[in-house]
Image (cartoon, grey):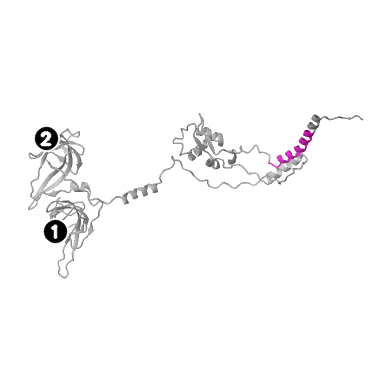
Amino acid sequence: MRRTTICRSERAALLALVAGLLAGPVLVAQDTTQARPDTSQPAPAPAPEGQLPSTHVVTRGETLWSIAQLYFSDPLLWPEIYRLNTAIIDDPHWIYPGEELNLAGAVSVAQAPDTTVVAAPQQVAADTVHAQPTPSADTVAADTTTVVDTAVVAPPPGPTESYQTIFDRRRTPSQEVRDELRAYTNQPYRPLRRGEFYSAGFLTEEERLPYGRVLGNTATPAIPRLTERSSATTFDQIAIQPPRSASYHVGDSLLIVRVDRDIAGWGGVVVPVGVARVTEPQRRQVLADVVMQFGRIHEGHLALPLEPFKDPGQVRPTPVDGGLEGTVIAERDLHVLAGPQQIIFINRGRAEGVSPGDVFEAFKPAAGLPGTSSEQVQVVVEIVHTRDHSSSGLILNIDHPNLVPGMPVRLIRKMPS
């Protein structure tokens, strides 16, 4: 019998071949535990979250579009990357090399499963793997059919969380209405406003005031006027002739007024129509710009140095009992019935301690006879301008519009001194 000698190299090759034959059935057995891919179904989703990096460093030439294509296989998912990196990216059209983008939060949204999930049999954990024979084609087909029949269809995905970028953060109609109402309700309280003080008017109290005279507009109006007098509006320039005993300088503010009528014992009724600020002094006149307007301004009106306005702040008048009493002198403008926001004059002023912001009420006293009416409040007025012995009051509330000169008034709320 012929003896065959096996060298060490041949012995190693033979051992490797035997090991390969023993390992072959194990690999085949592991492959059969997975369902065969169905070519009729759409392509599988990208790699699961565990295989994707949590961050990505931008290199030259990359865009959010290309990064979404690289990791999620869908370039249209770039807004998810931008949503997670709004602290780094100001404009999604511009990203720069070296920026480290976060990808962890976008994976769960970008890779939602949309295919049928096939349940794979559990593998038995063992230290030793036993070789199994290679299954035949019929056995593989039977096993595959069994796996498909026992496949569990995943339930439809629930509602995903919606995200908003800086482009989607729009206020709803209810939020807009709420913001507008909040702006109205949170306005600071002011007992007296600058415009109310300047536009109130007053009585001259028989005092000779340093009147200047408005000469008219300095420019021809763009709209042809129907009357001989020209009217000036806000931001128009007018010429004013100063009084002989005074001179105006650049920056001086002037109150433009008209004197309507005289009241016996109280002088003329001064009605403001606007405020002008001197911009250029000339030889016999000055030029001024109209900065506030309460009525029509034209030649022939008078100008006075503007009285400084002292803002009382946000203090509120406090109620008083048995306050100062006086009477109604007259209405500034002649009306048949009293109305809100009209001005009336009373015979109490700074000499009696009246200050802007005080509140008076005009009332009809009770007759004191059986069967007659009791005391009735007519109007409530707020003092907006004071002189030495008279004050101008703005009508706030009206209980009865019958307001006549001589009607008694009394102080009901007093400003802190």
Q: x%, y% of residue 100?
A: 50, 36
Q: x%, y% of residue 35?
A: 68, 41
Q: Which mark is residue 285?
A: 2
Q: x%, y% of residue 324?
A: 16, 60
Residue matched to label 1: 326
- Total numbered badges shown on the rendered structure: 2
Q: Is residue 71 above or below residue 343?
A: above
Start and end of the magenta stretch? Answer: 15-34
Q: Please report the residue visible at 14 percent of the width from the left and 46 percent of the height from the top.
A: 271
**Residue 167: which quarter of the image?**
top left
| Amino acid of disc 2 | Gln
Q: Quadrant of the C terminus?
A: bottom left
In this view, the residue farthest toward the right is 1
Mark nearer the N terminus (1 vs 2):
2
* Residue 194 shows in this picture: yes
Q: Is residue 279 left or right of residue 103?
A: left
Q: Is residue 350 above or below residue 117?
A: below
Magenta stretch holds residue 32: yes
Q: Please report the residue visible at 55 percent of the width from the left and 42 percent of the height from the top.
A: 108
In this view, the residue farthest toward the front is 8
| Amino acid of disc 1 | Gly
Q: Is residue 325 above or below residue 80?
A: below
Q: Quadrant of the N terminus?
A: top right
Task: Return the residue nearer the eye: 243 or 364.
Answer: 243
Magenta stretch holds residue 177: no
